[in-house]
Structures are given as structure tokens and as C-alpha cells.
Amino acid sequence: MSKVIQCIPNFSEGRDPEIIAKLAETAKSVPGVMLLDHSSDASHNRSVFTLVGDPEGIAEAAFKLCKIASELIDMTKHTGEHPRMGATDVIPFVPIRNVSIEECVEISKQVAQRIWEALKVPSFLYEYSATVPARQNLATVRKGQFEGMSEKLLQDEWKPDYGERKIHPTAGITAIGARPPLIAYNVNLNTSDLEIANAIAKMIRAASGGYKYVKAIGVMLEDRNIAQVSINMVNLEANPLYRVFEAIRFEAKRWGVEIIGSEIVGLAPAKALVDCAEYYLQIENFDYKTQVLENRLL
């Protein structure tokens, strides 16, 4: 059977339809790669693309997308709610079929080297590709964001894994690595008070003593005038979606706030959603492998 790798590059552009369309055209142009999904958010000013393909194709697509982004996105003019440090902010590679995480690590290094040599965009390796433990966590790598990154790179412990100790003047710096599947999951609140979203995010995220494998920040959606808890769920077996959703609902009540909706950015493993259905429907003795019709057909 063929090898399949998923790549989910995040770009610091969610408002200009022409740039987003150009990125999509580039993704679709690479042989051996399929663009499964792309979504953009104006408040975050960010676009997330989901691609799958064979190792050679996915590496080529990642490079070409980074090249287009470096040409079209100017970080000196970028504003948005989501933390960011580069035009192509992050490029994760995820093993899907007949591929090991180690193979994805090697591809991440090859792509990072090519991006530096051809585009002069430096990069940090993160997650499973990290060269030191401090670089495993993307939030730690990205701390300081684009505006503070030039000074950060001068610190002894923050020399880029590929490139010199200076950012690309307009494209910034990129995080590149291999990781398991995760879900980008956002929960919207019926309040415009960002501090409430920040307080809830602090309570649920692992770094503040909350749930292990959960990353969260508060974000303001200016176009809707509501606050959002923006989450990365990095281990869905250890902490399912419904547990975090209910924790947010519980914590929101103390502020007199309610959840008005949630969203998944990009694609999600089917089991993560089936687990939620099993929980809320209180299905007894459910077997995901044998009782889901599509699983039996596949």
C-alpha cells in the first residue's frame, strides 16, 4: 500500500481572498497531493490548509506554499488575534498510512533546509522534530511573535535550527515539525469580554495546570463581537472533545456566560466525533470498529 502523509500548513493571512486563492491553486498544482480542505478566519487573520499525499509530493507542496506565502504576505503589516511569527507560521507533517513519525521528522528537516537555502526563511524544528526539549512546544517556540523574534534569535538558546540569527524581513520565521494528529477546536461564548475567555483558557490548558494535552488561549472575534476559547487538542485518546467542552461550559457559568457554538478548523478524525456522540447519547457497549457503517465498508 502507498504511503500517505498529512500536512497542515498555517498561513498568516485570512482576509485577502486573492492571496488565499493563490495558495489554494499552488496546493492543487502539485502531483501526488490532494488539498482536502482550507479555511480562513478574518479575526485570527489566518488560513489553515489540509493536504495529503505521498512523501515526495507533500514535501514539494510544503516548499511551494511557503515560497508563495513569502512572496505575498508581509508580516510587517500583519495584525490578527492568533499568535504568529511568520508568513508560513507552522508546517506540521503527520503520519497517516504506512509512514512512521520518524519518516515525517526526516521530511521536516529536508523541507526546512530547502526553505532556508532557497527562500532565506529561517525555521525552528518543533514537536517530534525538536532538537532540544524546549522546542517541542509550539507556543514556547512562537513566544515573542514576529515583532519580538529578532531579539529572541540573539539569545544563546534560540538560534534557528536552519538559518541565521535573523528573521526574513517580511516572511519572518517558520516552525516545522512532525506530530501526531490533533484537532483545532474553538468554543464561542456569548460575551464580548476577552478576559473571561482568557480566564477559561487558563483553567483548561495544560501549561496552567489544566488538562494534559490541551493548549488554549482567549481570542476576540471582532466581526461577531464575541470572545472565543481557541484550543489545540493534541491527544484525543487522553482528553476527548466532550470533556473539554463540558469543562468550558462549567467554568463559563461562574462568569454568567454560556457557550453559543463551537467549531472545528480543518479536518478531524472520525473517532473523535463518534466518541462525543457515544458520550452524549450514553450508548452502552459501543464498538467503534464494528458498529460504524463506514468502518465496516472500508
Image (cartoon, grey):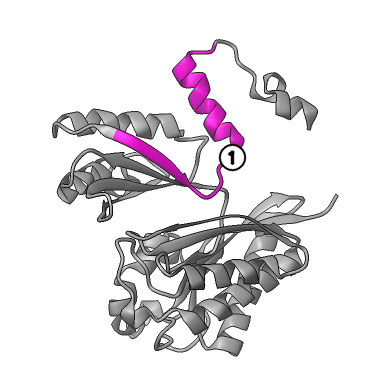
In the image, what residue type sits under mark 1?
Pro
At mark 1, the secondary structure is loop
Tag 1 residue: 269
- Taking 275 as reference, is 111 above or below it? below
- Where residue 203 appears, as percent x and y from the top left, is 24, 41
Q: In the image, is 270 to the left or to the right of 246?
A: right
Point 64% across, 67% down: residue? 27
Decide whether residue 264 is among the magenta residues: yes
- Viewer-proximal residue among 84 and 127: 84
> Is residue 131 visible in the rendered structure shown here?
no
- Where residue 177 appears, as percent x and y from the top left, is 55, 65
Point 55% across, 10% down: residue? 284
- Where residue 247 appears, as percent x and y from the top left, is 30, 31
Q: Quadrant of residue 92?
A: bottom right
Point 22% across, 50% down: residue? 225
Point 63% across, 64% down: residue? 105
Decide whether residue 280 is among the magenta residues: yes
Q: Which stretch is magenta?
A: 260-283
Query: Which quadrant holds the C terminus?
Result: top right
